[in-house]
Image (spheres, rainbow, N blue to C red):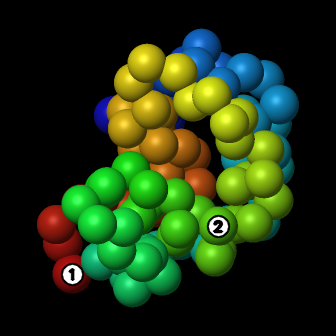
């Protein structure tokens, strides 16, 4: 997913407020592997697990996420991680 596609995904599903907070928050580049060390397992709920990492690293972004995350929240969570600078490449 490109950065532009991630912007569109978050904007369409969660709105301008979440997009603005995600784009303006201070970010430190992080690999997906490192990001996962900040996540807590949620009984098989992968989206929920990823959101625990967002909550730990970017609490202001987590607070902006709507309670009703729409019909396909997992794709939007992944797009959000792209906006937050999580590197999904497999290079170490």
| Number of other residues with Cα within 10 Å of mark 2, as a class: few under 14, some 14 to 19, many 20 or more | some
Secondary structure, mark 2, is helix
Q: Closer to the camera, 11 or 28?
A: 11
User: Can you see residue 85?
Assistant: no
Residue drawn at the location 38% of the way across and 50% of the way down = 47
> Which x, y percent locates residue 1?
33, 34
Looking at marks 2 and 1 on the same chain, the residue that comes earlier in the sequence is marked by: 2
User: In front of the other: label 2 or label 1?
Assistant: 2
CA separation, marks 2 and 1? 25 Å
Q: Residue at x 71, y 35 (%)?
A: 66
Camera sees residue 59: yes
Could you say which quadrant of the image residue 35 lies in?
A: bottom left
Mark number, residue 48: none
Q: Position of residue 4 (x, y in %)?
A: 51, 26
Q: Residue at x 83, y 31 (%)?
A: 17
Residue placed furthest toward the front = 43
Which residue is label 2 attached to? 55
**Which mark identifies residue 92?**
1
Left or right relative to 15: residue 39? left
Q: Nearer the viewer, residue 57 or 41?
A: 41
Residue at 58 percent of width and 63 percent of height: 54
Q: Nearer the viewer, residue 40 or 57?
A: 40
57 lies above or below 15: below
Q: Nearer the viewer, residue 51 or 2?
A: 51
| Quadrant containing the C terminus in the rendered view | bottom left
Q: Measured from the top left, where is residue 83 in percent x and y?
A: 56, 46
The 10 Å Cα crowd at callout 1, few under 14, some 14 to 19, many 20 or more, is few
Q: Secondary structure at mark 1?
A: loop
Q: Is residue 68 found left or right of 25 in the rendered image?
A: left
């Amino acid at each position: 997913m490109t950065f532009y596609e991630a912007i569109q995904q978050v904007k369409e599903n969660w709105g301008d407020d979440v997009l603005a907070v995600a784009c303006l928050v201070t970010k430190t580049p992080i690999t997906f592997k490192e990001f996962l060390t900040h996540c807590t397992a949620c009984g098989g709920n992968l989206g929920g697990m990823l959101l625990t990492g967002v909550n730990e690293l970017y609490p202001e972004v987590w607070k902006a996420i709507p309670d009703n995350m729409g019909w396909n929240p997992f794709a939007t969570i992944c797009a959000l991680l792209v906006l937050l600078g999580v590197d999904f490449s497999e290079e170490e």
